[in-house]
Amino acid sequence: MSSTTTLCGIDFGTSNSTIAIVRGHETTLVPVEDSHTTIPSAIFYPTDGAAVLYGRAATRAYTEREPGRLMRSLKSILGSDLIAERTSVGGQWRTFESILVGFLKHLKANAEAFAGGPIDSVVMGRPVHFVDNNEAVDARAEAKLGDIARAAGFKTVAFQFEPIAAALSFEHTLTRNELVFIADIGGGTADFSVVEVGSDRRAKVDRAGDILANDGVRVGGTNLDMRLSMAAVMPHLGSRAVTVQGHDLPRWPFIDLATWHRIHTLLTPKNMSLMKQILSDCAQPDVFGRYVEVIKQQTGHLLATKVEQAKIDLSNTGSLDVDLSEPVPGLRIKTTVGEFEEAIAEELERLHMTVAATIAASGQKPSAITTVFLTGGTSAVPAVRRVLTEQLPQATVIEGDLFNSVGFGLALEAKRRFRR
Ligand SMILES: Nc1ncnc2c1ncn2[C@@H]1O[C@H](COP(=O)(O)OP(=O)(O)OP(=O)(O)O)[C@@H](O)[C@H]1O
Ligand SMILES: [Mg+2]
């Protein structure tokens, strides 16, 4: 491929996406939404069939209560059967796959406008595992992402693990050699690699020998949001209420409302009649009534956004008052770091095990690892950082650009792959 062809790397994230291009020898992150190099992976279909909105514009339309449907975290369904299902949006039935094609087309068009010409080749990032312990589903998810990228107009599509892309970004700044543990902990997955990086190694054509281990687990910020919501918020919407006969209410409606990529599945006629039934059986109809109102008013994403913000605020403060009166009139809750960390104990344990397994798979003693490079929004959670620092106490911790390292590294990878 000639050095005048524009190439790109796309980090299609569960929560945020980026696209970076290579023009000549220069690698640049594209300002993909106004001056932002990141765009929330959010899509809004207005009811009246008007133009689809993406990113902040999509979440803004939803927050301003424009009629339509918001979808977020759709990367989470890549390996599942849901991807082929049809959903009614903007007055038409569409597959989730075609909705994602629209999102990638939007990224591509913005990058082409920025580059001033066509972009045919892309390196797409992928998590080390889309799902846990299922290679067949992993392969299917990657193949699906490839189909989506081709349907969006890319002629050549390659893949790279997200943490390896982050390693390339880190290496780009290095003047010496390091044995680095990369931790990319995002919205949907935590991905780890142990890599030999450095100024001496950058120019090597074959880097396979420098990659000592890759592993990952489906734990990310969206799981933490769900746990915090289930612990601190859903009890106020009836998750611990009982029926007049003293039976527990089902848990799934609360879990779905607390899970980003399930929220939009709740408002169906079948569900609504079931919720009415539960409401009439419930011993605390005033409490469960709040749940029903959130579904009816379609304010589930607004509630999830407030929970997410509370989680982010808990990265910097020990306790928090959270005003949930919009969308749940009169509701204010208190939450603490202690409550949050207890709620996410299982996720912390799974992260701990995967970090240990990655170090073991590298064949290196923990003391040989000189640096921990952190990227991904969830690496800002103090309890998540502790999982790494406890196992690699002697390593220097470097916080990369939490939201742009992977996308930039994918473009560096595009240069390596397509310009040999
Ligand atoms: N300061 C913070 N403290 C805690 N969590 C944060 C902070 N900032 C962002 N997050 C969380 O980080 C997550 C998004 O991170 P990021 O954009 O890296 O994910 P992603 O790349 O879209 O996801 P993935 O790579 O898993 O597909 C969200 O869950 C968000 O709530
Ligand atoms: Mg990511």
Image: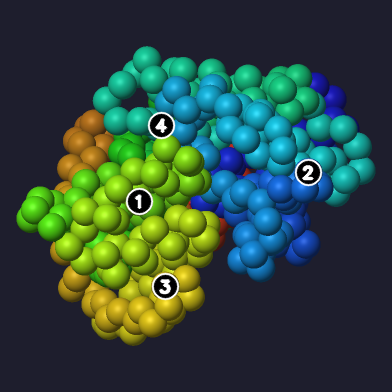
The label shown at residue 182 is none
Tell me how far mark 2 sits from mark 3, CA to CA. Answer: 29 Å
Proximity of marks 1 and 2: CB atoms separated by less than 8 Å: no
Badge nearest the viewer, 1 or 4: 1
Q: Secondary structure under badge 1?
A: helix
Badge nearest the viewer, 1 or 3: 1
Q: Nearer the viewer, residue 248 or 205?
A: 248
Q: Judge the density around disc 3: few (<14), some (14-19), many (≥20) Cα neighbours within 10 Å.
A: some
Residue at the spot x=27%, y=25% of the render?
A: 133
Task: Write down the residue under mark 1.
Answer: 276
Task: Write down the residue under mark 3.
Answer: 328
Tell me how far mark 1 sits from mark 4, CA to CA. Answer: 36 Å
Task: Write down the residue under mark 4.
Answer: 130
Q: Secondary structure under badge 3?
A: loop
Q: Nearer the viewer, residue 231 or 105?
A: 231
Mark before the other along the chain sequence, 2 or 3: 2
Residue at the spot x=23%, y=48% of the render?
A: 251
Q: Is residue 348 above or below residue 201?
A: below
Q: Judge the density around disc 2: few (<14), some (14-19), many (≥20) Cα neighbours within 10 Å.
A: few
- Residue type, numbered disc 4: Phe
Please state, as top left, top right, bottom left or bottom right, where the C terminus lies in the image.
Answer: top right
Q: Is residue 281 left or right of residue 268?
A: left
Q: Judge the density around disc 4: few (<14), some (14-19), many (≥20) Cα neighbours within 10 Å.
A: many
Task: Write down the residue under mark 2.
Answer: 49
**Residue 236 visible in the picture:** yes
